[in-house]
Structure formats: structure tokens, C-alpha cells
């Protein structure tokens, strides 16, 4: 009986040590994995801005004006962008297009800042994608996204 308790205590101690080691390993790897996911979401958002830029150029050549909404570029109208992007939400980012007198603006913001992205993006008819590191909206004055 005494040996059985001793073995049980030893197994419990082994379990606690293994749990502590696992937590230590995860605490080192988790921030890197999180940064990797954020980088991937941000690269995807920047890429989607370029997709819209090309779609707007095609739309303008076909219809003589820029599309006023993402839905106009989507599968139900012009079929120039995928439905997921035309919905305004893709890969943890929200995309909002606004018509302007000279063309359009497109702003992409993380759904949850710091969790789905750390940057905001801006695009207009000039065709240059801009970025802002932080929650403030990117604008035409923000640095270029490369």
C-alpha cells in the first residue's frame, strides 16, 4: 500500500514537471507563431488591395467609370474579384470602398486590431497602396506598402 502511494506521488510529480515543460516550450513558440499569422494576414490584405486596383482598372475600361462598391466588382456584377473580397471581409480584415468625385478610396482595417492585424491600408485611383502601422487609418499621406 505504501509503495502504491509512493508511485502515485511520483507519477503526479512527473505529470507536473511535464506540464511545466510544455508550458515553457509553448510560451517561447507562441509569440513567433502569432507574429507569423499577423504577417500573413497583413500581406494578404496588401495583396487584396492590389487585386482591387487591377479590378478597378478593368472595370473602368469596360464601363467608363470606377466601381463605387466592392459588390460592383464582385461575381454578381462585373465578376472581377472573388465573392469573399466583394463581401468586404477577408482574412481578418474589413475592406470599405467609397466613391469619390475623381474615383474611389479603399481602406482596409483589421477586424480586431492587434489580433487579426497591426496595420491599416489605403488605396485610391492613383493605384498606390499605403500602410499605417497602428490603429489610425492609413491615407494617401501614409508610407507606401511594398
Image (cartoon, helix red, strand yellow):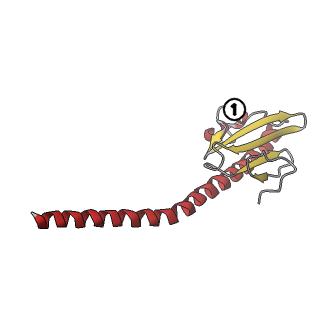
Does residue 105 appear left or right of residue 26 in this picture?
right
Quarter that holds the N terminus: bottom left
From the viewer's side, name the closer residue of 13 and 50: 13
Look at the picture and state if 16 lies above or below 46.
below
From the viewer's side, name the closer residue of 37 and 66: 37
Local packing at callout 1 (Cα closer than 10 Å; few below 14, some 14-19, many 20+) is: few
Report the residue marked by disc 1. 77
Q: Position of residue 123 (x, y in %)?
A: 80, 46
At x 29%, y 65%, the residue is: 13
Q: Position of residue 65 (x, y in %)?
A: 84, 35
At x 23%, y 64%, the residue is: 9
Look at the picture and state if 1 lies above or below 103.
below
Local SS, label 1? loop
From the viewer's side, name the closer residue of 117 and 129: 117
Quarter that holds the C terminus: bottom right
Look at the picture and state if 27 lies above or below 107.
below
Amino acid at each position: 500500500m505504501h509503495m502504491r502511494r509512493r508511485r502515485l506521488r511520483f507519477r503526479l510529480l512527473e505529470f507536473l514537471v511535464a506540464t511545466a515543460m510544455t508550458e515553457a516550450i509553448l510560451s517561447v513558440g507562441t509569440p513567433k507563431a502569432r507574429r507569423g499569422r499577423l504577417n500573413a494576414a497583413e500581406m494578404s490584405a496588401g495583396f487584396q488591395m492590389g487585386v482591387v486596383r487591377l479590378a478597378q482598372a478593368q472595370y473602368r475600361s469596360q464601363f467608363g467609370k470606377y466601381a463605387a462598391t466592392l459588390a460592383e466588382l464582385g461575381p454578381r456584377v462585373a465578376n472581377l474579384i472573388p465573392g469573399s473580397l466583394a463581401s468586404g471581409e477577408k482574412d481578418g480584415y474589413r475592406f470599405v470602398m467609397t466613391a469619390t468625385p475623381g474615383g474611389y478610396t479603399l481602406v482596409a482595417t483589421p477586424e480586431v486590431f492587434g489580433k487579426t492585424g497591426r496595420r491599416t491600408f489605403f488605396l485610391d485611383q492613383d493605384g498606390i497602396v499605403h500602410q499605417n502601422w497602428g490603429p489610425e487609418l492609413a491615407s494617401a499621406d501614409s508610407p507606401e506598402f511594398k
